[in-house]
Image (cartoon, rainbow, N blue to C red):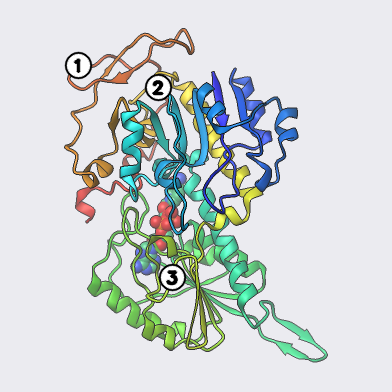
Amino acid sequence: MKVAVLKETFPGENRVALVPAHLASLKKAQLEVLVERGAGLAAGFPDEQYQQAGATLVDSRAEALAQADIVAAVRAFGGNAGIGAAGHSQPTDTFKSGQTWIGFCDPLGEPVALQDAASAGLSVYAMELIPRTTRAQSMDALSSMAMVAGYKAVLLGAAQLPKMFPMMMTAAGTVTPAKVFVMGAGVAGLQAIATARRLGAVVLAYDVRPVAKQEVESLGARFLELPLETKDAQTAGGYARVQDEEFLKRQRQLTMDALADQDLVVTTAAVPGRKAPTLITREMVEAMPPGSVLVDLAAERGGNCELTRPGETVVHNGVTILGPINLPATIPYHASQLYGKNVTTLIQHLLKQGFPSVNLNDDVIDATLAVHGGEIRNPTMREKLSLPPLLPKTEVPIPLAEGPAATPPAVPTPGTSPSPPATTPEPPPTSAADETKPGEPPATEQ
Ligand code: NAD
């Protein structure tokens, strides 16, 4: 079977889906890797390195797509649909029925973009839908990219600030350390805290989930405790619950004082599948010291600050507000290394579960497979597209053209009688009952 690595077409997308170091394990699994010429160049991985690692170079995207059983991309479908990129249009690819695609597809933001994939008979694994479970941790590309973004947000802020970060005691006097306030202490926020601490800043952090306190303090930062009722602020899966406007209003009033004393504010607050909550209003920005900087990591999801403009820098009352988009693409070498490892692990997982047959009894496959068998599978996407819920999943073996001979396939065919899974699924994670899928919060959480 062949895996193709595409050259990304989205403007500014410098990452690549697999780096040469990932090829050894794929080849060991009997996969041939095709790399579109120049695919890794912007990330610092020239064609020769892929060749030395055993890849076959192909001259064009069309050639790669014509041969591939699995297409590995960073951005595909909705993820390549042109957010903030004037004049960008998705490539008009010729799809091969039965082909499997893996990439960031923005399934919940741009579900329409995956309807073509469904009609073309593709199977699409959306990396955004990898469940945030212990078992799927090594495939969790949202976390690995959030980590890169949290790191870079602090560097952007530090470069913009008219001050230095560390305390310095010099013959010319003492420089006091910068004060950094991180709002939202999830994956990106914790990395922002760690980076700011390494640079010598004094860090304060806040999250609506009370459990974040311990993680914040373990990084040497202070947790801002607010007199807010937050015992229900976290879902069973560890995500923040949607808060009503009354709560957010009170939260804004209470954080106002803390903001008035900061040099750099990094906001990362998000609720899966929702517009980011507004944490900072115009009035609050006006209370920040002139020369201070706000980096809004939620810019792509509507922003945590009322004044943020995605992809732009706004200066208001002497406060600089950065709304960076696609930060991981600005550190493409390491971002690709981490993302490629997530993709490689997913491919290995699919093989273990009997690929090209599809074991829908596997929780990772079931959650991540957005499109299969001509259907949009994800319930939230179906809701957004006004499609009726799918019939309860059933599986039936079909004959295969290629793939591991010993593994009977299982594909969903609504209305047929169920058959046993093709492979022995791995045991569920011990904490599986506690975990939810991104974008699919139970109805009770709304
Ligand atoms: P995210 O990007 O959805 O949100 C970022 C942060 O914003 C979260 O910490 C959230 O609590 C916070 N937030 C939301 N509304 C807020 C508000 N009004 N005020 C302040 N903060 C607010 O989340 P994420 O970083 O992707 O993940 C969050 C949590 O999910 C993690 O801390 C962890 O518990 C869990 N997680 C688990 C795994 C795993 O088990 N493999 C992987 C990743 C994340």
- First reached walking from the N terminus: tag 1 or tag 2: 2
Numbered circle sitting on residue 416: 1
**Residue 361 x %, y %:** 33, 25
In the rendered structure, the answer to whether residue 439 lies left or right of residue 295 reads left
Residue with the mark numbered 3: 309
Camera-near label (1 vs 2) is 2
Give me the residue at 44% from left, 47% from top.
89
Quadrant location of the N terminus?
Answer: top right
Q: CA distance from mark 3 to mark 2?
A: 40 Å
| CB contact under 8 Å: marks 1 and 2 | no
Give me the residue at 63% from left, 43% from top.
337
| CB contact under 8 Å: marks 1 and 3 | no
Disc 3 marks a residue whose amino acid type is Arg
Does the closest atom of ligand 1 sit within 8 Å of the Cβ of label 2?
A: no
Residue 209 visible in the shown view = no
259 or 340, which lies in front? 340
SS assignment at label 1: loop
Quadrant location of ligand 1?
A: bottom left
**Residue 259 x %, y %:** 46, 82
397 or 207, which lies in front? 397
Q: Is residue 111 above or below residue 394?
A: below
SS assignment at label 3: loop
430 or 201, which lies in front? 201
Give me the residue at 30% from left, 67% from top.
230
**Residue 280 x %, y %:** 39, 77
Q: Is residue 180 above or below residue 275?
A: below
Disc 1 marks a residue whose amino acid type is Thr
**Residue 258 x %, y %:** 45, 83
Residue with the mark numbered 2: 98
